[in-house]
């Protein structure tokens, strides 16, 4: 059956607030460099007030990936929860403006829209402080099964695998996708997510996922071993595992093959925010067009290289032109 959409993404709808900072600022505020941590409303407001001038845009891992797919020329939709507040309006307008459908109704119980306060030091390391807010209020009622069935791939971020209702929402979406003969994809998102939900993540990957995205730290955490052994462990668990290794490129694993993809060149790494998300954009764009694993990986690498060459997780170049000829 022909699919109307390439990908439907499901994830935490979070506004990224990105600013440049110093190691001194991180130390003064007792922030661990290059980490991601969850904060409450009071801390979110206090840290936001201390941050320097920055940029605000729709973010969250799956949201970034869906924006990238739209900028490549793909057709997609996003399922995520925001409030009807100012940041919620920013999120909705921003993700629709790049060409991705956003169909989820606003949360109306007074919980603010989630935001991620991202502090980027001169060495391009990002320190993320995330207030989840309305994002974690996603429920199975937000899953439009007809929408899921209309897409080749349903893509979910591991960050969402925490609140029970959101977990149920993803399992409902996965069931709807497979029931319609479609594929299910997952990004492990962060090693802390993997360690927090180790057994259920292993069951999720083995029982529900066709296309898995993970970086080296995440895949080794999932299987509790080194990278080479993790490659063998994931083989056969999923149809495709796209494993990124920063400057070492990526390794694409299928039951019958292992394809090594070199990293695309970058003149200067400025901000690594969104690197894995945009790798997934490029990979899924190729995947939904029937390209081979090497081409899918190359598209992912090119998109990731573009995004780390500047601040923010929105491309400043024409992604369609960058992947022409791949």
Image (spheres, grey):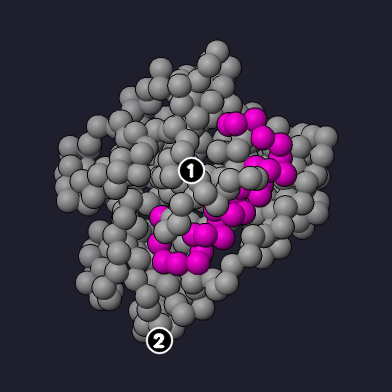
**In the displayed structure image, the side of residue 63 where residue 307 appears, left or right:** right
Magenta segment includes 307: yes
The residue most toward the bottom is 24
Query: Label 1 belongs to which residue?
Result: 72
Quadrant location of the C terminus in the rendered image: top right
- Disc on res. 57: none
> Where does the image place residue 68, in percent across and percent down from the top left?
46, 46
Residue placed under numbered mark 2 in the picture: 24
> Are the residues tagged 1 and 2 within 8 Å (C-beta)?
no
Asked whether 4 or 23 is in front, the reply is 4
Residue for point 57% across, 35% down: 185
Kindly indicate the quadrant of the structure image that contains residue 78: top left
Query: Is 37 placed left or right of 206 in the picture?
Result: left
Residue beneath the point at 46% across and 38% down: 73
Find residue 51 and report its horizontal and vertical position in percent. 28, 74
Marks 1 and 2: which is nearer the front?
Answer: 1
Q: Which residues are magenta?
A: 288-314
Check disc 2 and report its element: helix, strand or loop.
helix
Of label 1 and label 2, which has the lower sequence position? Answer: 2
Residue 180 percent across, percent down from the top left: 53, 15
**Label 2: few (<14), some (14–19) or many (≥20) C-alpha neighbours in 10 Å:** few
Q: Is residue 177 left or right of residue 312?
A: right
């Amino acid at each position: 059956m022909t699919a109307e959409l390439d990908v439907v993404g499901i994830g935490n709808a979070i506004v990224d607030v990105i600013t440049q900072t110093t190691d001194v600022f991180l130390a003064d505020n007792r922030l661990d460099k290059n980490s991601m941590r969850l904060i409450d409303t009071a801390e979110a407001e206090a840290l936001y007030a201390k941050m320097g001038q920055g940029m605000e845009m729709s973010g969250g891992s799956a949201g970034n990936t869906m924006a990238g797919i739209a900028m490549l020329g793909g057709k997609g939709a996003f399922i995520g929860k925001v409030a009807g507040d100012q940041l919620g309006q920013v999120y909705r307008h921003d993700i629709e403006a790049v060409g991705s459908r956003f169909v989820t109704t606003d949360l109306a119980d007074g919980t603010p829209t989630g935001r991620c306060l991202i502090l980027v030091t001169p060495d391009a390391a990002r320190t993320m402080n995330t207030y989840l807010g309305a994002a974690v209020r996603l429920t199975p009622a937000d899953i439009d099964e007809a929408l899921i069935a209309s897409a080749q791939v349903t893509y979910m971020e591991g960050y969402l695998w925490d609140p029970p209702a959101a977990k149920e929402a993803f399992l409902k979406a996965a069931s709807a996708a497979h029931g319609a003969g479609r594929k299910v994809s997952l990004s492990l998102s962060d090693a802390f997510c993997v360690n927090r939900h180790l057994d259920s993540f292993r069951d999720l990957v083995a029982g529900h996922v066709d296309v898995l995205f993970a970086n080296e730290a995440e895949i080794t955490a999932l299987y509790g071993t080194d990278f080479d052994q993790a490659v063998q462990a994931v083989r056969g668990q999923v149809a495709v595992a796209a494993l990124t290794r920063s400057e070492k490129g990526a390794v694409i694993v299928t039951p019958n093959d292992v394809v090594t993809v070199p990293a695309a060149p970058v003149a200067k790494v400025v901000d690594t925010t969104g690197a894995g998300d945009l790798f997934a954009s490029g990979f899924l764009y190729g995947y939904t067009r029937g390209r081979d694993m090497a081409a899918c990986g190359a598209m992912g690498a090119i998109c990731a290289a573009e995004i780390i060459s500047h601040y923010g997780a929105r491309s400043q170049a024409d992604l369609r032109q960058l992947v022409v000829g791949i």
